[in-house]
Image (spheres, grey):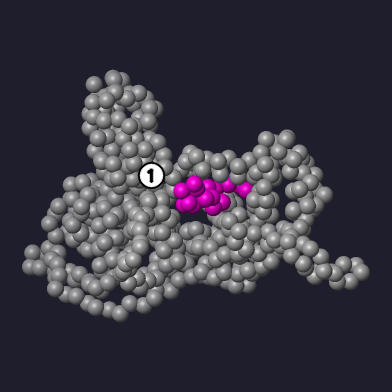
Amino acid sequence: MPIVDLVLPKLGESIMEATILKWHKKVGDTIQLDETLLDIATDKVDSEIPSTTEGVITEILFEVNSVVPIGTVIAKIQSSNEGSTNTTPSILNTIAEKAKVPENISLPAREQESIPYIPTVTETSPIHTLKELTNLTTGETKFYSPLVMNIAQNEGVSMQELQLINGTGTQGRVTKKDIIAFIANKKITGNTVQFTENQNNQSSVDTKSILIKPTSIYDNTEGEFGISATAKLANPSEVVVEGLTEIIEMDRMRKLIAKHMVESVQTSPHVTSFVEADVTNMVVWRDKVKQLFEKREGIKLTFTPMFLECIAAVLEQYPMVNSSLQGDQIILRKDINIGMATALPSGNLIVPVIKGANQLSIVGISKAVNNLALAARNNQLKPQDTQGGTFTVTNVGSFGSIMGTPIINQPQVAILALGAIKKRPVVVETPSGDAILVRHMMFLSMSYDHRIVDGAMGSKFLAAVAKAFEAWDPNRQWFQYV
């Protein structure tokens, strides 16, 4: 009976690795085709991985809590199907065997989403993402995952330095934790490794050559406004634990959120603008149609779909706000996919994405919002549900806040916070003159990446969103927009 390799599948365009949470089977167990073998977690969602064949599990290659690169063999199954073949991808092995690795290897600038650059067999120069590279000093062949190679490129770690890192992974492989620890130590000490040629024309390392250089707020490796410009934040002082205290370990998702928030602040210079909107027309219209809407569509009508419909329409007028930055190139996103920050029962946040929001009716947006929110709360989101966002909206008003200064969801360039709706006396212009009326008011606040969206554009976009809210037709027949 053939042995089939079970490979960790691709889970989304920007997902490079996953953490194994639970194995549902053990060595010696029988498994059926499409039966769940293990649970994994990414920085987006948790997922179940089914078996690609039926048979008996002969080997499990990674333990629980192991961080595994996408495309790695994680288990071996003795298939009961005689026609089964080993389907492990071999493209990277083929490239590595055919390409000779020069001493100076460079990698093209890639999107901040860490999409791996996979070269074709016809390319003449090898790239950082080759599966195996030969150590220049010892001739030893070492494995580097695409994630490690991307981190090395973005942080300016040369191949010579990469080969000096002692890996803690399987068979001495360099893991994400290894390279991050190396980079952190390098930034603190300012150490640089100098390479010289010995008499045998082999690369040798002068580990005694240490250059101490002052650090600035931004360490720019791709030009003044390059995407790899990262802020060096001071390490906080050690916390002194005294008195009545409790120490709580962060859960996995909270650690990922913390990591992403710090990386976003380090990547994008944040600016936040504020505007006030009169949403009385929206409130009046919703009160008028919500019962009929729920009876006909089977879901409740909230303000969120109404807000998203207006925001999507304004994004069409301001494509720069619906973009990303790659080096010195601005990537204008033609699709308008709005991420919707959703609170989980655990208190953590996740951002499912409504694809093509500008092409959906108010009913379509309502159903998408309802389905994604329900899936998020029940931990049933799929990887594709959190992929491809081009703009993010967070409703801080649902928790009582009147405004906020949200952090950008990379690699996007803006995020809009919706404040709580409050009734207040407001001066309103009427045909008979100014009058003080009770109106439903709310604050909108938007944080944006000042490298690409300046204050004028950010303020104009935010004002346009407020006007769209205020221009909502209180006599609108919603069923005409189904």
Above or below 305: residue 227: below
Image coords of residue 265 (percent x, y)? 45, 66
User: Residue at position x 26%, y 69% from top?
Assistant: 186
Question: How many numbered badges does the structure rendering display?
Answer: 1
> Which residue is the site of mark 1?
41
Q: Quadrant of residue 126?
A: bottom left
Pointer 1: residues within 10 angstroms few (<14), some, or many (20+)? many
Q: Residue furthest bottom?
A: 214
Q: Does the magenta run of residues contain 341?
A: yes
x and y percentages locating residue 329 in the rendered image: 49, 64
User: As drawn, which residue projects farthest toward the right?
Assistant: 432
Question: What's the residue type where badge 1 is placed?
Answer: Ala
Question: Which of the image's four quarters has the N terminus?
Answer: top left
Q: Is residue 465 left or right of residue 228?
A: right
Q: Residue at x 48, y 51 (%)?
A: 347
The residue nearer to you, when weighing 198 against 181, is 181
x then y, percent, for residue 477: 80, 44
Residue 9 image point, x, y percent: 37, 39
Quick check: can you spot residue 348? yes
Report the span colored magenta: 340-359
Q: Is residue 39 left or right of residue 289?
A: left
Q: Quadrant of residue 274?
A: bottom right
Along the line of sight, which residue is nearer the eye, 123 or 461?
Answer: 461
Secondary structure at numbered mark 1: strand
